Image: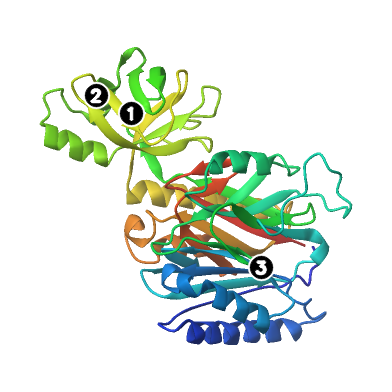
C-alpha cells in the first residue's frame, strides 16, 4: 500500500443516531483535513467499517443510506452488536456507533454478500483480483455457518478469515453496501493489503490435557478411559459426594478447551494454543458420569477443563498485542495503519476488571491507532468459529 494510505476513525454515543453520525462526521472531517495538509496529501476514502450497538439496529438501513450519501465514494461493511469498541473505548448497553474508513486502492478489495456473491471456485476470474484474506460478518442462526466459513476460506490464497457474528438482542444484522440477516458478508482483500492477526483465548486450563476416549455427538462419556465427570471433579478438587446444587453451580462456570489430536493443544504449559475451541459445559448426568458440551466432541480429540478470569484474560490479551507490536517493530511488516478488534460479548470491561480495560490494553500496546470493532456472538479466525475470544487484526503498509 502507498505511504499516503489514510485510516480515519470516529465514535459517538447518543440517543438519536442522527446526532451520533453528525459527531462522527466532524471527527472524520478533522482527521481527513489534517492528512490532506501533510506532504503528498491523502488519497480519497474507499472502504468503511460501521459497527452499531443494537440500540441502532432497527435503523440500520437509514444509517447505511446516510453513510452512503455523506461519503458517496466509500463502500461500507459492518455489523450490529451488544457493544461496540474504538481505540481505548468500549460502549456497552447504550446507543453508540463506531466508524472507520481507509483510502485503499479500489483494485485491492471486493465486497461480498448475498447480493454480491463470490465467484465460483471453478470459474476463472475475469477481473484479475486474487482474494488473499477476508473479513467476514455473519448471523449466528445461519444454517451450517461453520461449513460456510470453511468453504469461503478455500476461496482465499491464505485461507485466513477474520471477523465475527452479530450479537444484537433485538435484530442481528450485518452490512456490505446493504443490510443482511443470514448468510455471510464482508470484504475480500488482495495480497497488496498487509495485515497481522492474532487470537486471544482468555482462558486458563485448570487441569491436564486429556484424550477423549468415548463420546457421541455432544455427550462426553470418558476421558483417558475414566468417566468424564470423575475427571472434571478431580481437576476442580472436588469429590463425588459434592452436593448436586454445588456441582451445577461449579460446572456452569467451567468450560472445556477442545482441540483435534494433531493440533497444538497446550503449546505452552498453562496456555491454550490457537487451534483450541473453548466451549461451555451444558449439563451433567451425575449417575452415569456424563457431561454435555456445547459442541460436537469426537473420540481422539484433546480436552482440558478451564475457567475464565480477569487475570488470564489480561495476560493473554497482552501476549497477542505484544506479539503484534514486536512484529511491527521488526520492520518486516511495515507500519500499523489501522486495526479491527472483535471480542466476545461475554468479555468486555467486567471481564477485565474495569470499564474500557480491554480496549485500553490494546491501545497501550499498539498506540492510539485508528480502531473499530464490536462485541460478537462468535469470533472468526482462519476458517473456524470461536467463542470467548478476541481477534485483533492490524492493517499494515509502508
Numbered circle sitting on residue 207:
1
Residue 107 horizontal side relative to residue 113, left or right = right
Give residue 156's mark: none
Camera-side residue of 120 and 129 = 120
- Element class at badge 1: loop
Front-most of residues 34 and 302: 302
The number of numbered discs placed on residues in the rendered structure image is: 3
Say if 280 sits above or below 140 in the image: above
Compute the Cα span from label 3 to label 2.
52 Å
- Which of pointers 3 and 2 lies earlier in the amino acid sequence? 3
* Front residue (pair 169, 320): 169
Residue at the spot x=79%, y=68% of the render? 3
- Hey, which quadrant is residue 222 in on the image? top left
Instruction: Read off the residue under disc 2.
Output: 234
Q: Secondary structure at mark 2?
A: helix
Residue 306 found in image quarter: top left
The quarter in which the C terminus is drawn is bottom right
Q: Which residue is mark 3?
A: 177
Residue 269 visible to the viewer: no
Where does residue 14 sit, x and y in percent of width and height?
42, 82
Determine whether, in the image, residue 82 is placed left or right of residue 160.
Answer: left
Structural distance between the alpha carbons of marks 3 and 1:
47 Å
Say which label, 1 or 2, has the lower sequence index: 1
Q: Nearer the viewer, mark 3 or mark 1?
A: 3
Q: Is residue 284 above or below residue 89?
A: above
Res. 138 visible in picture:
yes
On-image quarter of the N terminus: bottom right
Circle 1 Cα neighbour tier, 10 Å, few/some/many (<14 / 14–19 / ≥20): some
Answer whether labels 1 and 2 touch (C-beta < 8 Å).
yes
Amino acid at each position: 500500500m502507498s505511504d499516503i494510505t489514510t485510516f480515519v476513525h470516529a465514535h459517538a454515543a447518543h440517543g438519536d443516531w442522527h446526532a451520533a453520525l453528525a459527531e462522527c462526521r466532524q471527527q472524520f472531517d478533522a482527521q481527513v483535513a489534517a492528512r490532506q495538509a501533510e506532504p503528498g496529501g491523502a488519497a480519497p476514502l474507499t472502504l468503511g467499517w460501521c459497527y452499531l450497538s443494537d440500540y441502532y439496529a432497527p435503523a440500520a438501513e437509514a444509517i447505511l443510506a446516510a453513510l452512503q450519501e455523506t461519503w458517496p465514494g466509500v463502500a461500507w461493511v459492518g455489523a450490529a452488536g451488544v457493544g461496540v469498541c474504538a481505540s481505548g473505548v468500549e460502549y456497552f448497553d447504550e446507543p453508540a456507533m463506531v466508524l472507520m474508513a481507509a483510502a485503499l486502492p479500489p483494485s485491492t478489495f471486493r465486497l461480498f454478500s448475498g447480493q454480491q456473491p463470490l465467484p465460483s471456485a471453478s470459474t476463472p476470474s475475469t477481473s484479475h483480483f486474487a482474494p488473499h484474506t477476508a473479513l467476514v460478518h455473519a448471523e449466528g442462526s445461519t444454517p451450517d455457518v461453520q461449513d460456510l466459513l470453511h468453504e469461503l476460506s478455500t476461496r482465499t490464497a491464505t485461507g485466513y478469515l477474520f471477523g465475527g457474528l452479530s450479537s444484537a438482542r433485538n435484530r442481528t444484522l450485518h452490512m456490505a453496501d446493504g443490510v443482511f440477516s443470514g448468510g455471510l458478508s464482508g470484504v475480500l482483500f488482495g495480497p497488496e493489503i498487509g495485515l497481522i492477526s492474532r487470537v486471544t483465548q482468555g482462558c486458563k486450563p485448570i487441569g491436564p490435557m486429556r484424550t477423549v476416549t468415548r463420546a457421541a455427538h455432544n455427550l462426553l462419556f470418558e476421558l483417558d478411559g475414566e468417566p468424564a465427570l470423575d475427571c472434571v471433579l478431580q481437576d476442580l478438587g472436588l469429590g463425588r459426594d459434592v452436593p448436586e446444587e454445588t456441582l451445577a453451580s461449579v460446572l456452569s462456570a467451567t468450560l472445556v478447551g477442545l482441540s483435534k489430536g494433531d493440533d497444538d493443544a497446550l503449546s505452552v504449559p498453562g496456555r491454550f494454543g490457537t487451534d483450541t475451541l473453548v466451549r461451555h459445559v451444558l449439563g451433567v448426568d451425575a449417575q452415569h458420569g456424563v457431561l454435555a458440551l456445547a459442541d460436537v466432541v469426537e473420540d481422539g480429540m484433546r480436552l482440558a477443563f478451564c475457567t475464565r478470569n480477569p487475570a488470564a484474560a489480561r495476560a493473554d490479551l497482552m501476549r497477542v498485542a505484544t506479539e503484534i507490536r514486536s512484529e511491527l517493530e521488526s520492520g518486516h511488516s511495515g507500519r500499523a495503519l489501522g486495526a479491527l478488534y472483535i471480542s466476545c460479548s461475554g468479555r468486555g470491561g467486567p471481564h477485565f476488571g474495569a470499564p474500557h480495560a480491554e480496549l485500553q490494553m490494546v491501545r497501550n500496546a499498539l498506540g492510539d491507532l485508528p480502531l473499530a470493532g464490536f462485541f460478537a456472538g462468535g469470533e472468526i479466525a482462519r476458517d473456524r468459529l470461536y467463542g470467548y475470544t478476541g481477534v485483533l487484526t492490524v492493517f499494515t503498509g509502508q
